[in-house]
Image (spheres, rainbow, N blue to C red):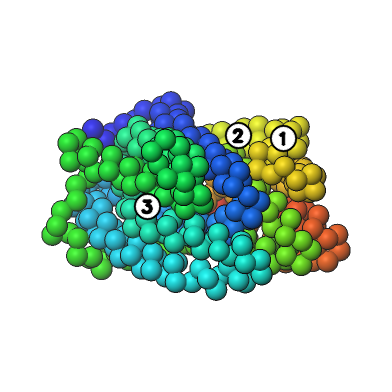
């Protein structure tokens, strides 16, 4: 099935065939994020604020699951390209067993830390209570979520993008349908409020995992999970973590960033915390389709790199960069033209909408240039170069933006925080270009 098409099919049709299913599923996932937040916002503005405060921990769990999955994906694709079937199977098997441990640990720790975590950012007891009610239910499904991500990356590594598209879309659609049913108690279902939103999310994640398991059992793929390989092998495990840990940190850094920005904005008003939370919900509609292209690119980069096809590696990178830039351009236009209606999806308070309009217009100035760092990170992860990718993300989410946000907020108030976004994207794009060029430069 996956013998030669990744290195023989023309590059542009290949990228489109690998990426479009993921772009479609990411668009549905983006829609889920918007719809989920829309229904939570109907409960109360406190509920939406609680969701914004829980989001960094949710994002960290997703980051750990996806990041380790990226490691599994890259290692499998590399070994398939190098025609080493045993190590590809070992990577999938030991990766799955390690992911089970990760999921159980994160579930326990996340539920335990939430009371103290929420109190760091708000003293409003109603917000704290809503955040705890949501997080306990949502985090109970952590293991299902993490295992679903692992199977997603295994299927992507062998080029089965349509399966991942179907699984993700079914999970997201189920979530969208269940949200109003469980939140408001439609038909025979009880009115669960914010817990209903969390349960809808968990059930959607579980459905995605079930679909992967059914397809894996009924339809053979080029990589198989074997019991004898589930005990981690030192060499393969080291390779998984050498890519997975930097990828996890790449994805987890936004959680640290959001928490730090919440702390800066809390000094002005809780309104700005809500605006930041809404922005990150809206941002998913822009960045998740771009991430769909990146997901299609990763196995192509890894496979061709493993097969020694350097020219194709470079061509794949350039085409994906142009595609990501196009998506970001569309997002910029939308945020400049209709920021008010976008904010109005989540709040009816004029003060919040006005603050959000200002934020979206300023932040969107950095969207297009961010394509350089987003594409470079994904390309480096696909090549198994986790550390250079982490350097880029550190610049984007920590080294540049946090000092800029702190200093600019002292000069311009909350607007200074919004301006720090485009400043960071511009400077990180320069760093990304240099880091990528250095990482892929042929050795003498």
In percent of the image, x 23 and y 33: which residue is there? 1
Reply above or below: 260 against 308: below
- Of mark 3 and mark 2, the one earlier in the sequence is 3
* Residue at image mark 1: 341
- Between residue 214 and residue 216, name the one nearer to us: 214
* Residue at image mark 3: 145
Q: Secondary structure at mark 1?
A: helix
In the image, which is nearer the foreground, mark 3 or mark 1? 1
Q: Is residue 233 visible?
A: yes
In percent of the image, x 33 and y 42: which residue is there? 207
- Of mark 3 and mark 1, the one earlier in the sequence is 3
> In which quadrant of the rendered view does residue 122 lie?
bottom right
Reply above or below: 355 against 389: above
Circles 3 and 2, Cβ within 8 Å, touching? The answer is no
Distance (Cα) linking label 3 and label 2: 27 Å
In the image, which is nearer the foreground, mark 3 or mark 2? 3
Q: Residue furthest right?
A: 411
Q: Is residue 22 visible?
A: no
240 to the left or right of 265: left
Q: Secondary structure at mark 3?
A: helix
Distance (Cα) linking label 3 and label 1: 32 Å
Instruction: Name the spot of residue 368 as percent of width and height, x first.
Output: 67, 40
266 to the left or right of 372: right
Instruction: Name the spot of residue 353 as percent of width and height, x first.
Output: 76, 44
Distance (Cα) linking label 2 and label 1: 20 Å
- Between residue 444 and residue 340, name the one nearer to us: 340
Instruction: Name the spot of residue 305 as percent of width and height, x first.
Output: 38, 46
Say few, some or many: other residues with alpha carbon within 10 Å of mark 3 (under 14 / 14 to 19 / 20 or more). many
Instruction: Name the spot of residue 208 as percent of width and height, x first.
Output: 34, 42
């Amino acid at each position: 099935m996956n013998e030669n098409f990744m290195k023989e099919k023309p590059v542009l049709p290949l990228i489109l065939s690998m990426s479009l299913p993921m772009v479609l599923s990411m668009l549905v996932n983006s829609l889920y994020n918007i719809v989920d937040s829309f229904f939570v916002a109907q409960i109360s503005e406190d509920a939406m604020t609680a969701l914004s405060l829980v989001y960094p921990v949710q994002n960290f769990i997703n980051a750990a699951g996806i990041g380790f999955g990226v490691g599994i994906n890259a290692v499998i694709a590399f070994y398939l390209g190098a025609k080493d079937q045993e190590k590809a199977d070992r990577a999938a098997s030991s990766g799955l067993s390690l992911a089970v441990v990760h999921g159980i640990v994160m579930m326990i720790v996340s539920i335990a830390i939430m009371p103290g975590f929420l109190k760091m950012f708000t003293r409003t007891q109603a917000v704290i209570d809503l955040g705890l009610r949501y997080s306990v239910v949502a985090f109970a499904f952590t293991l299902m979520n993490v295992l679903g991500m692992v199977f997603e990356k295994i299927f992507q590594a062998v080029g089965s993008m349509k399966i991942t598209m179907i699984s993700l879309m079914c999970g997201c659609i189920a979530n969208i349908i269940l949200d109003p049913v469980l939140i408001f108690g439609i038909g025979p279902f009880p009115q669960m409020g914010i817990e209903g939103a969390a349960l809808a999310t968990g059930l959607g994640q579980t459905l995605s995992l079930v679909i992967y398991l059914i397809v894996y059992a009924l339809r053979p793929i080029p990589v198989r999970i074997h019991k004898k390989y589930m005990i981690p092998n030192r060499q393969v495990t080291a390779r998984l973590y050498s890519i997975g840990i930097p990828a996890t940190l790449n994805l987890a850094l936004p959680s640290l960033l959001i928490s730090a920005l919440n702390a800066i904005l809390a000094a002005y008003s809780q309104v700005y915390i809500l605006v930041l939370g809404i922005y990150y919900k809206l941002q998913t509609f822009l960045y998740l389709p771009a991430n769909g292209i990146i997901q299609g690119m990763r196995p192509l980069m890894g496979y061709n790199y493993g097969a020694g096809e350097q020219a194709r590696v470079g061509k794949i990178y350039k085409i994906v960069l142009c595609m990501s830039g196009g998506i970001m351009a569309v997002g910029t236009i939308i945020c400049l033209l209709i920021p008010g209606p976008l904010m109005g999806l989540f709040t009816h308070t004029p003060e919040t909408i006005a603050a959000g309009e200002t934020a979206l217009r300023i932040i969107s100035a950095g969207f297009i240039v961010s394509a350089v760092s987003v594409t470079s990170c994904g390309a480096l992860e696909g090549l198994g170069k986790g550390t250079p990718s982490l350097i880029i993300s550190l610049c984007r989410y920590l080294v540049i933006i946090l000092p800029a946000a702190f200093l600019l907020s002292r000069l311009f108030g909350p607007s200074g925080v919004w301006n720090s976004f485009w400043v960071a994207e511009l400077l990180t794009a320069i760093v990304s270009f240099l880091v990528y060029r250095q990482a892929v430069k042929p050795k003498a």
